[in-house]
Image (cartoon, coloured by chain):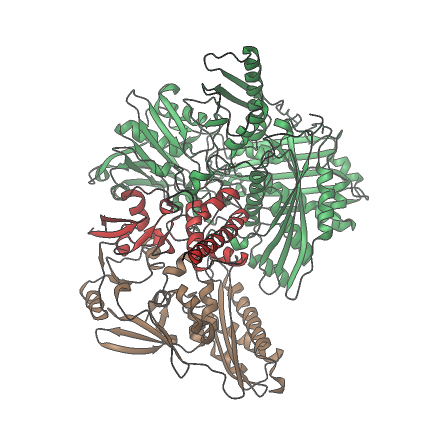
Chain colours: A red, B brown, C green
Amino acid sequence: MDEVTVRVTVNGEARAVRVPVGMSLLEMLREVLGLTGTKYGCGAGDCGACTVLLDGKPVNSCLVLAAEVDGHVVTTIEGLGKAGLHPVQEAFVRHGAIQCGFCSPGMIMTAVGFLAENPHPSEAEVRAALAGNLCRCTGYAKIVQAVLEASRQLASLEHRRDAIRGGTP
Amino acid sequence: MYPVSRYLRPGSLQEAIALLQEYPGSRPIAGGTDLLVALKEKGVHCDTLVDLKGIPGLGHLRESEDGSVEMGALVTIAELLKSPVIRQRLPLLASAASLLGSYQVRQRATLGGNLCNASPAAETACPLLAMDARVRLVGPRGERVLRLADFFRAPGQTALERAEVLVGVECPGVADREGARYGGMYLKLGPRQAMDIAVVNVAVWLGVAGGRCVDARIALGAVGPVPFRARDAEEALVGRPLDAETIERAAVAAQQAARPIDDIRASAWYRREMVRNLVTRALSGTVAKVGRPDRG
Amino acid sequence: MSEQFPLAVVGRSVERFDARDKACGKAVYVADLHFPGMLLARPVRSPHAHARVAAVMVEEALATPGVVAVLTARDVPGSNLVGSRGVRDQPVLAGEKVRFVGEPVALVVAETPAAAESGVARVRVAYEQLPAVFSPEEALAPGAPQLAEGGNLCYHGRIKRGDFQRALREAALVVTNVYRTHLVDHAFLEPHGAVAVPEPDGRVCVWVTAKTVHPLQEEIARVLDCPKERVRVVAAAVGGSFGGKPDIQCACLAALAAAKTGRPVKVVYTREECFQTSTKRHPYVMQYTHAVSGDGRLLGVKVDLVADAGAYTGESRAVVGRGIIHSVGPYYVPNVEVEGRAVFTNNPVSGAMRGYGVPQVVFAHESQMDAVAHELGLDPIELRLRNILRPGLTTITGQAIPEGVGLEASLLRMREILAREASAGCGEELTAWGLGCFHYGNGRTAVEDVGRCRLRQEVDGSFTLFVGVPDVGQGSNTILAQIACEELGVPWGTVRVVSADTAQTLESGPASATRVTVVVGRAVVDVCRRMRELLAGKGGETGPPLEVVAEFRTDATALDENGQGNPYSTYTYGVQAARVRVDRLTGRVRVDRLLAVYDVGRVVNRILFEGQVEGGALTGIGYALHEGVQCSEGRVLNPNFHTYLLPTCPDAPPVLVEVVETTDGVGPFGAKGIGEPATCPTAAAVANGLFRATGVRFRELPLTMEKVYRALRG
């Protein structure tokens, strides 16, 4: 099997790694870069546990070849909220959206990517966006609450940021 | 680890075609959300992947002055969903796009990929068949345009020849002509609210004028080796008032056209029943939307 | 405890210990572990459901680059048979025979995953296929191939009380039906796995994702033929268990490979392997006869249930044992004849799954109760109120119901809630509410259930609580610390918890049987009391750190030959109602609202409690509607999440959870367990709703679109 060099920005850091052609992005993150926050749950794009942001968009890292991300930007759960928790993570913790936690990193990454696209979603929109992230513990109720709460939190942060900018002469 | 030993990323269509010719057992990859799963689960053999995503000019999505819509093969399902052009001109395709896979898969999966995968249950196939879509193919022997209905050959098989690439999809415009109103409905049946592979999919598109049906398209998925148009059912509608009796006749004709199989998701009998019921539902729903044609 | 008094920490929705780490991807699961020099192991699995293993040829595999070792049954130094609860009949690596598809016959240990895969492909196994059986009916038929030495009957239990034949003669109404339930998978998101690490002192440390560690230590020691002390078992973060992670096989395979190679070894199953080889919920066939008086009193019930145990014993005896104890539901029935059998087949091994043999019987007894109500023209809640277990009455095992149980209060509350909930259907949808009522014994069945723990006061005055039971994701570490803080009278944050490490904790039983809060929680109460006494005795003097241990034993008793006795110390009671919507044209059923009222004694942590009910109920909805492992000759046809259909986020209905707090429980501060009770009544509620919506009684799960459509079409 051929190897390829992948130059990729992961969590803000430029990396260059040599990997087998058939290696998935998930395997590269976990086995080569040691970023084990991203989980293997099914390997077929059904469960969402391996979700990361690729150029800001949530994707199943099990269904992306490492070779395909050459020249792109990847964000994993480890790259969220470098200074403290991201508001989505904070909301998951506060609302009891986490039980066994195995789906949580993927669930959170989907939510982060989704809220960037749709900052003021309805509950139905949140549920539709999370359909590809399976959770066997929570029944999703608290996860949905957390994402809705995070959207309000992010909106008010945005509002505050705008207010500060507006107030600067 | 996927059983692939070569990954190539051409920068132009001509280069891609040349690579596909050069490497036997090579395949183009776009979003990869179907192909990679097939490599793992279905024993699809493919030594070399030729990534089309670096090719410029295959991601367009535009409306022409005549109301027709052109879509590049690399347009993602998420892009289709966000596009006002698609929502306005191809509402059935927008519906289908919202039901395709997960949010994550939609970011990655492409229109071209969904068609080339040639699943009998392909989400985008029925709406595009109903809109008389054509596909543009480019290969070593140049370019050709096929009706989408002629593109699907069998489960997983298309009319694509070796080293030929699907580059785009075109749909003629369907504007409300004088006196005629158009509308339709896409229905997908699965056990859950999301993430299902369809047990049956149905797309219906009707034109109504002067109290009668002037144009009827009914496309069916997951009930035969390929998605197809139910022509007899369409004929049962055209020229007639869209009353319950006509709808029933069309639904039965659609049911008779279905050639489903038994599989893990449903029996052939159930699928045939569902064709009749869902075609009925889609036709009735469409009639309710475009207005009762009684008074024209 | 005679009254509810205000508490400082118990009852608060404190943030669980591991939430932040899990939110940041920092929690370490077995697959995340890495050790220098670590190898990867992959099992070679049988493609046959029943076959003699004539030969296993490993030479070619051994010659594969990167392959370090290939193990077969001959490489097992000690006992090759493992099992749960002292019944050891399942080989770690099959030697002579395989009894189910996917059973491991060899283990390839390699430097990389790719090398391990290549090695697996190069192990040649010569099988001689044997006749196989795939249903209990086939297995019990005369002349059927015998799978185990003792025959195909894995378990036979009975409960007899009163005179059922007399009840039958006196009954105004007799309702007889057969119910069937299907095979489902736990589908925890984290696959099975284990990592074994040889220590410099000759010991081996095995990291597991499991519901228990101490029994694993014993099994591994037997397999390696070494003293227990040479094996340390530690639970990593556990990504869901729901009963399905005994994980003996996985842990033993990793340990064997580490012992053989002297290097750390990781085994992680693929999702397909999990579906093919992990334990499942038992399918039941249940024949019920209810004998009822004209005014709706249950005079007698006869139950005959047969469970498919699959290929090995696993936990079948205890599962079906629990099933028959709960088989008539939370009702007073003076005359009963109950028989339960578990039967070996060549299907995947059945085991423990959230509800432990009970959701099946709840589906049956609640369908029967609704059928009786329908026949008598009685409101379903009214019929239940006439029959529920009340103080002074006895269960079918003769156990007296104490003062304070809250089933009646739960039903009355449910009636109030239902009165204000909308139920109107529209157009092509049929809509109705259905009810499921249940009880569930807390703790292990018909044995003295033991919880143990150790508490240490640290030099800074804080406390460390050591418990043997793993937190499988439900938050038990947090719950136990809340109980400890309350009992010690210290603020939240003063007690930390170390759990599930055989080197540091005492055995305190598995994370199953809805026992942790009640049984281990009581041990925590006791250890804290002792600590308080010690501290009081010291009068504030400083000295060496204090350490105390405690043990709590339930007063559950064994059952006699008629199934009589007190199998549990406490029962959780409750009722769920599901609003069911049926699409007439497709037969598709949706649950769009779910109500739950539970007597759980006292809620220790409201958020965690709600999370259990919401999650458990959705598991019940999946069980009722669209989950199902489809097998053909023992092979799982749908070993992935695009064909095994879990409920997704848009499928989950809003759930209203209400609690009736009561005083009869033996648990800490009156608390009862909720983990399994959350799942038990849901499928019954859905099936009853479906009957009320359509007029068709469905007696076989799951309630798929096609099945419902077929019935509606008639």
Q: Is residue C713 left or right of residue C23?
A: right
List x then y, in percent, for residue C83: 45, 29
Res. C142 visible in picture: no
Q: Image quadrant for the N terminus of chain C?
A: top right
The image quarter containing residue C30 is top left
Which residue, as the protein is rendered here, is positioned at the far front?
Answer: A169
The image quarter containing residue B156 is bottom left
For the image, the number of numbered tags is 0
Q: Residue at x 42, y 65 (%)?
A: B122
Q: Judge by depth and name the residue closer to the eye, C669 or C474.
A: C669
Q: Is residue B5 above or below residue C110?
A: below
Q: Is residue B253 above or below residue C46?
A: below
Q: Is residue C75 left or right of residue C240?
A: left
Q: Judge by depth and name the residue closer to the eye, C477 or C567.
A: C477
Q: Is residue C555 above or below residue B287?
A: above
Q: Judge by depth and name the residue closer to the eye, C592 or C644.
A: C592
List x then y, in percent, for residue A5: 21, 51
List x then y, in percent, for residue A161: 44, 54
The image quarter containing residue B244 is bottom right
Q: Is residue C433 above or below residue C403?
A: below
List x then y, in percent, for residue A27: 31, 46
Q: Image quadrant for the C terminus of chain C?
A: bottom right
Q: Judge by depth and name the residue closer to the eye, C75 or C390.
A: C390
